[in-house]
Image: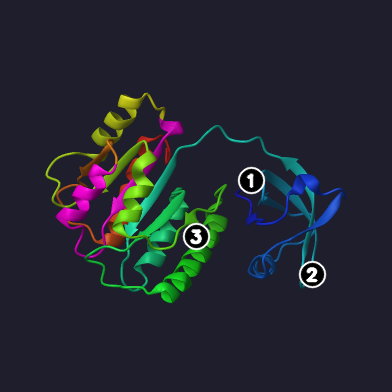
Amino acid sequence: MSLPHFFLDNQVIAHEALGAFALRLAPDDVKHARALRLSPGEHIAVVDAAKDYFECEVVALDQDALSVRIAQKFDADRTLSAVVLVQGIAKGDKMDDIIRHATEIGVSGFVPFSCERSIVKLDEKKAAARTQRWRSIAKSAAMQSGQRDVPEVSLPLSLGEVCDLVRNAHAVLVCWEEASTGSIREALTGALGAQGVLPEDARVVVVVGPEGGLTEHEAARLTAANRFASTVSLGPSILRTETAGLVAPALVLYELGGLQ
């Protein structure tokens, strides 16, 4: 059975000197612990600010704090591939759903992309508020799905900023409905093979456009930004942006050895 997961932003468990100690949880996480009705003797998983991973036994839960003792420290996993989704900003709650579900399958980071065809245009204040909401959703989804890390969610970026971001990736897969050939498997295998990069060490960026897709100009700029970038097709069907935003990274994760 999967343990409930909690993340600490400013507490390193290795520094705790007492056998039992309070976790410095965010207020919403304390509420979540109470909603789970955790009781003494139950176990939870905790990832601390040093990214160390512990199984802890609940000692007490009151209105303001969750106290635990360490049951065991888990060994660090081997280096895992990182898949970042650059997602064209979509309207309504679509971005919420994309970030929530893509977090559940293991996407490690999100970059909201202000595209030419994005219906939603965010000023600085709205962008900050939306980003905070998306980060909260990513954290909640990571806790629910038992991820080892909370995905990073950046502020919305422009085309030029995204091009700068992808320069050092091992592979950049630009999902474009006008790409007549080129599968994710072929593009990924070719890029990693040319560099001698193992799947578990790969840093891969997946780009998905908003409603209406990417323009030819955007696709060209993105593929020119990295020598191991290419446009790829997701098959003969035209997928909604919220569908492509989940299917594309899921296929990449599968090819890299995840979801198996």
The amino acid type, in three-letter code, at marker 2 is Asp
Residue 138 numbered tag: 3
Residue 51 numbered tag: 1
Nearer the observer, disc 3 or disc 2? 3
Q: Position of residue 53 (x, y in %)?
A: 66, 44
Q: CA distance from mark 2 to mark 1?
A: 26 Å
The amino acid type, in three-letter code, at marker 1 is Lys
Q: Which residues are magenta?
A: 199-225
Q: Secondary structure at mark 1?
A: loop
Picture quarter with the C terminus: top left
Disc nearer the start of the sequence (3/2)? 2
Work out whether residue 171 can be spotted.
Answer: yes
**Camera-nearest residue between 164 and 148:** 164
Residue at which label 2 appears: 62
Q: Residue at x 43, y 39 (%)?
A: 258
Q: CA distance from mark 3 to mark 1?
A: 17 Å
**Camera-nearest residue between 73 and 85:** 85
The amino acid type, in three-letter code, at marker 3 is Ala
Dots 3 and 1: beta carbons under 8 Å?
no
Q: Secondary structure at mark 2?
A: loop
- In the image, taking residue 61 as reference, residue 250 lies left or right, namely left
Residue 150 numbered tag: none
Q: Residue at x 55, y 58 (%)?
A: 144
